[in-house]
Image: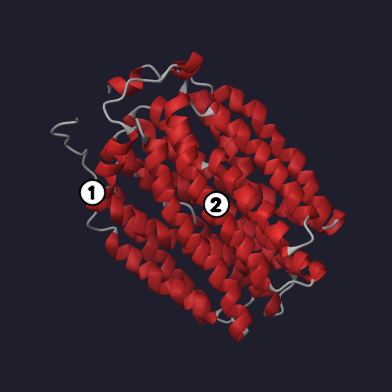
């Protein structure tokens, strides 16, 4: 496509190396936030809903700012977006540790970190991949980037648990706020020459035309609905499972190991999904993932709870965890092209984050109301079945544009 020719100048190796390391750190840190739920709420004498609401706001903020981060990255390149995201991430983590009121905690842990994640994670990185990796390797490359985020969870969650236990919750966040700044030098490797000196690649569509086209397309709507379910399930489990297991009498290290296992097996799951996306209809991959999640959660609820059952659940769920990310974004690129991929991916991800908001907030709210997470687990099962069904009719073929005004 003519609109991508000038931007397609970075080597795939460079894009994947720098992009994967950025996603490893940015996603790895946020996957461990559930470890701070009890230390922070107990130290501040807050309810679980207070913490959950702040993380829910974080997910909404991530989704909302992700749209604009994608627009800016598509138009001017991703470098400045990533650098600003890293700075906001450091400020948000420090503020999260130092906040002493629910409002300031929500501002730093919610709004600021959410905006930071918008500029340092998948929507922006996948836009770079889309512009610099050929279509015959794009799904695979997206799988590699998603696998990096999964490895970040495997690496960072035990690290965060170690920092909390040995330095304290506040001090651990301050240490991470310094560590996340290493994203800035990595962003230098993602400076696309096609965007240098204010240059903008020629596009056949404006932003408004691209949005109008996408939102009128039924398959785009179905992908957004499926991604809502993905967000609901993974963020509820990621944030609330540590407390759920502790409530059931299991030691804290079980939760840390479980989250680490999710991250480890997600490396294989996301990479496998990316590879399969090059040869198998992506709608079938997505339908299988969502249906399998419903089955796995059901079995987890039915079998007696023990460390071993938790580890098996974490391993299997980990394989399915973010494996929706490569096929979903690859389908968007396949249908609409890559000129506005970061922006369109941002809108799809916004739906994911609305689901994340509902999952994490309802987890805290219903626990405070009922003393149990059972209702939310049941919702996660029902939504998984729903998502499995609605992904089947998705059309993956390139959209035919008759005329662009």
Residue marked by disc 2: 61
Nearer-the-camera pick, 114 or 389: 114
Measured as percent of width and height from the top left, residue 102 is found at 71, 64
Residue at 40% from the left image edge and 47% from the top image edge:
347
- Judged from the image, the secondary structure of the residue bearing numbered disc 2 is helix
Residue at 35% from the left image edge and 27% from the top image edge:
134
**Can residue 273 be seen at all in this image of the molecule?**
no
Nearer-the-camera pick, 20 or 70: 70
Residue at 35% from the left image edge and 54% from the top image edge:
224
Measured as percent of width and height from the top left, residue 334 is found at 29, 38
Q: Is residue 93 left or right of residue 385?
A: right
Indicate whether 200 appears above or below 56: above
Indicate whether 384 appears above or below 218: below
**Can residue 77 be seen at all in this image of the molecule?**
yes
Indicate whether 356 appears above or below 241: above
Tag nearer the camera, 2 or 1: 2
Measured as percent of width and height from the top left, residue 63 is found at 49, 50
Neighbour tally class for label 1: few under 14, some 14-19, many 20 plus, Cα within 10 Å: some
Measured as percent of width and height from the top left, residue 271 is found at 46, 44
Where the N terminus falls, by quadrant? top left
Nearer-the-camera pick, 226 or 281: 226
Neighbour tally class for label 2: few under 14, some 14-19, many 20 plus, Cα within 10 Å: many
Where the C terminus falls, by quadrant? top left
Outermost residue, left side: 402
Picture quadrant of residue 175: top right
Residue marked by disc 1: 217
Outermost residue, bottom side: 370
Outermost residue, right side: 167
Residue at 39% from the left image edge and 59% from the top image edge:
289
Q: Earlier in the sequence, mark 2 or mark 1?
A: 2
- Judged from the image, the secondary structure of the residue bearing numbered disc 1 is loop
């Amino acid at each position: 496509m003519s609109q991508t020719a000038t931007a397609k100048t970075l080597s795939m190796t460079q894009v994947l190396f720098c992009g994967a390391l950025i996603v490893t750190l940015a996603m790895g840190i946020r996957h461990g936030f559930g470890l701070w739920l009890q230390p922070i709420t107990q130290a501040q004498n807050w309810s679980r809903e207070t913490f959950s609401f702040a993380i829910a706001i974080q997910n909404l903020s991530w989704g909302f700012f992700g749209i604009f981060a994608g627009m800016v990255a598509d138009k001017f390149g991703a470098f400045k977006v990533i650098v600003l995201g890293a700075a906001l991430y450091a400020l948000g983590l420090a503020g999260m540790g130092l906040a002493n009121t629910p409002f300031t905690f929500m501002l730093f842990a919610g709004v600021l970190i959410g905006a930071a994640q918008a500029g340092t994670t998948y929507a922006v990185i996948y836009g770079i991949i889309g512009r610099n990796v050929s279509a015959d390797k794009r799904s695979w490359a997206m799988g590699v980037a998603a696998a990096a985020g999964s490895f970040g969870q495997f690496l960072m969650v035990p690290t965060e648990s170690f920092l909390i236990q040995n330095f304290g919750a506040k001090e651990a966040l301050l240490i991470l706020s310094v560590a996340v700044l290493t994203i800035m030098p990595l962003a230098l490797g993602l400076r696309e020459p096609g965007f240098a000196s204010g240059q903008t690649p020629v596009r056949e569509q404006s932003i408004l035309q691209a949005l109008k086209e996408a939102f009128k397309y039924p398959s785009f709507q179905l992908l957004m609905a499926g991604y809502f379910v993905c967000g609901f399930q993974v963020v509820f489990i990621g944030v609330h499972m540590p407390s759920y297991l502790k409530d059931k009498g299991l030691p804290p290290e079980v939760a840390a190991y479980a989250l680490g296992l999710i991250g480890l097996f997600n490396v294989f799951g996301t990479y496998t999904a990316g590879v399969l996306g090059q040869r198998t209809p992506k709608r079938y991959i997505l339908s299988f993932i969502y249906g399998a999640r419903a089955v796995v959660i059901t079995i987890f609820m039915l079998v007696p709870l023990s460390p071993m059952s938790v580890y098996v659940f974490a391993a299997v769920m980990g394989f399915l965890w973010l494996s929706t990310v490569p096929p979903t974004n690859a389908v968007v690129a396949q249908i609409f092209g890559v000129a506005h991929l970061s922006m369109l991916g941002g809108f799809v991800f916004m739906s994911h984050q609305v689901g994340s908001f509902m999952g994490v907030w309802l987890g805290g709210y219903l626990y405070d109301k009922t003393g149990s997470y059972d209702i939310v687990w049941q919702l996660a099962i029902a939504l998984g079945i729903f998502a499995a069904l609605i992904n089947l009719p998705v059309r993956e073929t390139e959209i035919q544009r008759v005329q662009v005004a």
